[in-house]
Amino acid sequence: MQHPSVPILGISGHKKSGKTQLIIELLKHFNERGLRVAVIKHEQDHFHIDQPKHDSFSLREAGAQQVLLTSNQRWALLYEREQAQEPSIEAHIADLQTESLDLVLVEGNAGNTFPKLEVHRPIMCKALLFPTDRHIKAVATDSPLILSDEITLLDLNNVKIITDFICEEIIAPFLNKG
């Protein structure tokens, strides 16, 4: 991955492990600290953020390649891709206004080379991901685990500690590079 203009952290884990819920809780803590965070969430094919009977849906269905929804509080760009292959995560990050961000969280997209935090729930009886992904730097779990020394163990139920870890291990070193 090329040198990014903002620190990036992947949130990895098996389906239904609590990745989205952790991100929601992290966002609350980041906001309290005045940090500006973007989230990239990978979805399955053909997701819709607009609905039938809304003008944006009708415009897109009629053939608009891009529809920009805008109001005084937010905007969203709907962009129809012609190619079947999804762009790289780098291309998605380039779409963000990174100059106004302190961190980008990426949910899913397991094959990327940026640092990751794994969400693991032993009750789900799924294998840990970190042994096969050298980019995982920490595992957040709700049960005691024995991990290798290079992996940080975090309490999934203590979001403040997870936030501290991200600020100290992901954001601060990035800022110190510049």
Image (cartoon, rainbow, N blue to C red):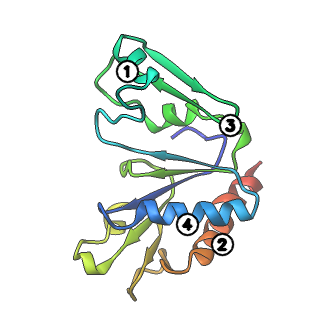
Q: Label 1 is placed on what type of residue?
A: Arg
Q: Please name the amino acid that badge 2 sits on.
A: Asp
Residue at numbered disc 1: 81
What's the CA distance linking mark 2 and mark 1?
Answer: 38 Å
Please tell me which residue is depicted at 38% across the width and 48% down the height of the picture: 109
Determine the residue positioned at 42% across, 31% down.
Answer: 50
Task: Give me the C-alpha separation between circle 3 and circle 4.
Answer: 22 Å
Q: Are marks 2 and 1 in contact (CB under 8 Å)?
A: no
Nearest to viewer (mark 1 / mark 4): 4
Q: Is residue 37 above or below residue 28?
A: above
Q: What SS does tag 2 mark? A: helix
The image's mark for residue 73 is: 3
Dot placed on the residue nearer the N-terminal end, 1 or 4:
4
Which one is nearer the viewer's eye here, 64 or 173?
64
- Name the residue carrying label 4: 25
Question: Residue furthest toward the left?
Answer: 125
Q: Amino acid at mark 3?
A: Gln
Q: Is residue 51 left or right of residue 24?
A: left
For label 2, the residue is 164
> Which one is earlier in the sequence, the residue at label 3 or at label 2?
3
Mark 4 or mark 2: whose residue is earlier in sequence: 4
Name which quarter of the figure residue 28 lies in.
bottom right
Observer able to see residue 134: no
State the image coordinates of residue 160 (x, y, percent, origin top left). Answer: 63, 76
